[in-house]
Amino acid sequence: MPNLSREQARAIDRLAMRDLGIPGTVLMENAGLNALAAIDRFMAERGKELHRAVIFCGGGNNGGDGFVSARHLHNRGTPVQIIAHKPLAQLTGDAAIHATICRNMNLDIQPIPAQGASALVSSTPQPDLLIDALLGTGFQGELRPDMLNLIQTINAIRAEPDPPIIAALDLPSGLDCDTGQPAQPAVHADLTVTFVAPKLGFNNPAAQPYLGQVVTADIGTPPQLLAQVTSP
């Protein structure tokens, strides 16, 4: 399976929507649901039971994937807390649709308090699973201070005794899709559920400590699209 660049990953989404007529909301639904299935397998292999989950959702499509996973966790009876990087009113596109569904279902969606996300997480019981759905393939460069705080919070939770499983959607937040160069900081994941195919930057040895185990999840795009965007 070839590794995808940022532009190739975007091209697959674009072709699926434009040429095949697959709505972006459907691609996002498939991503969040299939990521959750991969996380279930990972936790079962390690004998970890899932009683509570915290999901950090960014303001873009990666956050939308997180909202989908949160909804399905809730539907099967797992208590979920969503920590939202942006107010829901500021979300747009497919992510806004899935976030609105979560809000209409009365899921626990928490904005980041003034004292930072660490205070919010520490005020609740320790989760068994933390999903990083903050930044996806679009990230490059330096982190903004608010995002830096969120990533520091995730890594601090990972350093605690008996930490939750840290699962990153598509790639760990703060990791550059094309170069694999981590920002300071980037999320240290136990599991990376990457969509369609691994990303180009995963080949960089500097990315390895952040990825954990890498598994690929389907989003409902046919194999010919992958072949189309990766053929010379």
Image: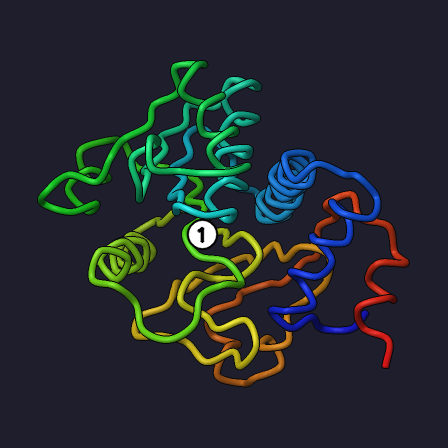
* x, y percent for residue 102: 45, 23
Q: Residue furthest left?
A: 115
* Residue beneath the point at 52% across and 67% down: 211
* x, y percent for residue 182: 41, 76
From the viewer's perspective, is residue 78 above or below residue 90? above
* Residue beneath the point at 78% across and 73% down: 2
Q: Residue furthest right?
A: 224
> In the rendered view, does 218 fall on the left or right side of 171?
right
Q: Quadrant of the C terminus?
A: bottom right
* x, y percent for residue 178: 57, 77
* Residue beneath the point at 41% across and 51% down: 134
User: Which residue is denoted by mark 1 in the rendering?
Assistant: 166
* Residue beneath the point at 40% across and 43% down: 57
From the viewer's perspective, is residue 169 above or below residue 124? below
Q: Residue furthest front?
A: 18
Taking the image as drawn, is residue 95 in sight? yes
Q: Quadrant of the N terminus?
A: bottom right
From the viewer's perspective, is residue 167 above or below residue 114? below
> In the rendered view, does 8 fall on the left or right side of 188?
right
Taking the image as drawn, is residue 44 in sight? no
Q: Residue furthest top?
A: 105
SS assignment at label 1:
strand
